[in-house]
Image: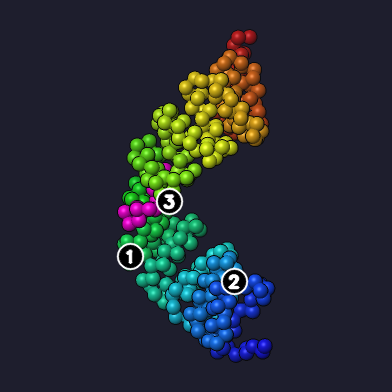
Amino acid sequence: MAVSSCSTNPTPNSQLSYGNDSIPPDIRVISEKIASDRNNADLYFQRAHAYFSHNKFVDAISDMKIVLKIDSTKPEYYNFISDLYFTQNKTRDTRDALRRAIKLDSSNVEALLKYSQLFYLMRTYDTAMYYVNRSIHFDKTKAVAHFQKGMILKETGDTARAVSSFQSAVEFNQNYFEAYMQLGVLCAAKKNLLALGYFDNALKIQQQSIEAGYAKAKFLQDIKKYDDALQQYDSLLVSSPDNQDITYNIGAILFEQKKYKDALQKFDLTIKRDDNFFRGYYGRGGCFEMSGEKQKAMDDYKKCLAIKPDFEPAILQLDAIERSMRKKE
């Protein structure tokens, strides 16, 4: 079939990336509509979304270029193609598309927020903050904007204001898992018991989340609620039985409880799973040391340092044993 090359009559994608019988039904339906209405930008826009849902980003970009040839006046078109460029790591094209969207509509909240997120990823925090504040100015109820502002503040060290922004995010979206996690992490860093409530809220939203469950267990461990921490870690092992960090932390708690034989078994398990797990050697060395087996302790500390030469706890413990042994001589 001959295809016109006239610029006022853009052509649909050839869809060569699919076999004739493998074109997804949703794309086939839209393509049939395009065949009889080739100057309809919204149809190409719809098909670009369909391509995107099938991870056909190049085809989606191709359709969006046709869309913009037909109609270059809608910010939502530039917002979407910026997403497509971003999936292809085309940062400059992403930036240019968002600039165009903002130029067309300086109050477009979606474009302002995406622009802020782009500069956040580039670690240009002043610019990121400027545009997220503009987005909030035009829509104060958008939870993701407050979350984004919180992330910028966190990265720049202003944790107090970051907490306030994350709290605003959950105020406008009570199911915002990531915001509860950030609140929990920031409170946990200050040993603030409010962290438990935030982690519990996150677990209500994603009950099987290893991230939230681990964060809660680690906080309980850090504030020396060892029995509660062990209970939380044990529940996590049901769905993540080979998790090295969980196994190691259980060993660390048992060590603090002076259950050296049980702790040694946990550390030994981490080493059997991965003989490069340096913390396992360090933990096992500690158990040997506390049990009076100093040569075995030294051997494990040395194995730890052979993998991680700058691991200061092992350096200090090894040095302490060597000094004590020299004194006895």
Which of 156 and 228 lies nearest the eye of the viewer?
A: 228
Residue highlighted by disc 3 = 178
Residue highlighted by disc 1 = 139
Across and down, in percent, residue 260 comes to 54, 20
Which of 171 and 30 lies nearest the eye of the viewer?
A: 30
Q: Residue at x 63, y 25 (%)?
A: 300
- In the image, which residues are magenta? 169-186
Of marks 1 and 3, which one's residue comes earlier in the chain?
A: 1
Please say if 54 is above or below 34.
above
Q: Residue at x 64, y 34 (%)?
A: 273
State whether the magenta stretch is mostly helix, strand or loop.
Answer: helix
Is 1 a magenta residue?
no
| Secondary structure beneath label 1 | loop
Is 174 a magenta residue?
yes
Quarter of the picture containing the C terminus is top right
Of marks 1 and 2, which one's residue comes earlier in the chain?
A: 2
Residue highlighted by disc 2 = 24
Specify whether 265 is left or right of 97.
Answer: right
Quarter of the picture containing the N terminus is bottom right
- On the question of residue 15 being in view, the answer is yes
Instruction: Say what amino acid the circle numbered 1 marks.
Output: Asp
Instruction: Say what amino acid the circle numbered 2 marks.
Output: Pro
